[in-house]
Amino acid sequence: MNLGEISLPDRDSYTIMDILSDLKLIEATPTITYQVACDIFYYELRHCSDELGGDATVTQELKHIIDFMQNDYERMLVEAELHEARHKPKAAIETLEKSLSEDIKNYELIHSAEQVRKALHSAKEARMKEIEQYKKIEEGIRREIKETPDDPNLYNQLRLLLWIQGRYRAAKNAYVKATKRGWTPETSKLVAL
């Protein structure tokens, strides 16, 4: 995938589904969804909480979206719930979508379209930088694996690095090697990205 060739649609207004669609388009990882939650959804949550109250369905679902973007998605990746080659960021974001009501999916954001567009373009840029950064880290992990080829935690780290780069089949292979060497989410030394 070449993110530089992907153009995000310009919209006059944005719904939650529009945001989720754009996040799938750029294959947003937990780091990127965390950023989007901060840049877009916290403002929406504050507004809904003030206008509708903390117990309103929309407010509660916005809290759920933020929790997924800042906690659950990363946990799913770290604990290897996303370990098959078909488990791409799109699949993770679709997990969130399935848990949302139609009302929240069609909720039109208070942010201006320009603000949302700017935040999404920033997320795309961050995603491209993230891929490059993780390519460099991968080199170091591969050197460590040559020195300690039976360390299951190194293969798990490699799995995460490859997955974040969008190399899902290679990540699946690293997962298989990690589990063959005894890696499990319960014994993992890695608890967060």
Image (spheres, grey):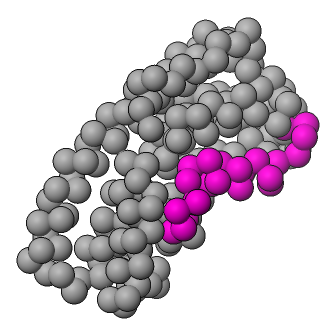
Position of 136 with respect to 69 (left or right) is left
Between residue 8 and residue 50, name the one nearer to us: 8
Q: Which residue lies furthest to the left in this view?
A: 147
How far across and down, in percent of the image, does residue 70 sit?
55, 50
- Identified at 61% across, 9% down, the residue is 114
- Residue 191 shows up from this direction: no
Q: What stretch is highlighted in magenta?
A: 82-104
Q: Which of these two is toward me, 187 or 165?
A: 165
Write down the quadrant of residue 47 in the picture.
Answer: top right
Compared across the picture, whether 147 is left or right of 181 comes to left
Residue 139 screen position, x and y as percent: 16, 56
The correct choice, above or below, for 192 with respect to 20 in the image is: below
- Give yes or no for residue 84 being in the magenta stretch: yes
Instruction: Examine the image and state in which quarter residue 109 appears.
Output: top right
Identify which residue is drawn at 71% across, 50% down: 94
Left or right relative to 34: residue 181: left
Is the residue 166 above or below the residue 104 in the image? Answer: below
Q: Is residue 88 in view?
A: yes
Q: Which residue is located at x 11 percent, y 66 percent?
A: 143
Expressed as whole percent of the image width and height from the top left, the position of residue 63 reads 71, 46
The image shows residue 83, relative to residue 54, as above or below, that is below
**Is 170 colored magenta in this rendering?**
no
Task: Say which quadrant the N terminus sits in.
Answer: top left
Q: Give the percent coordinates (x, y) of residue 48.
A: 79, 31
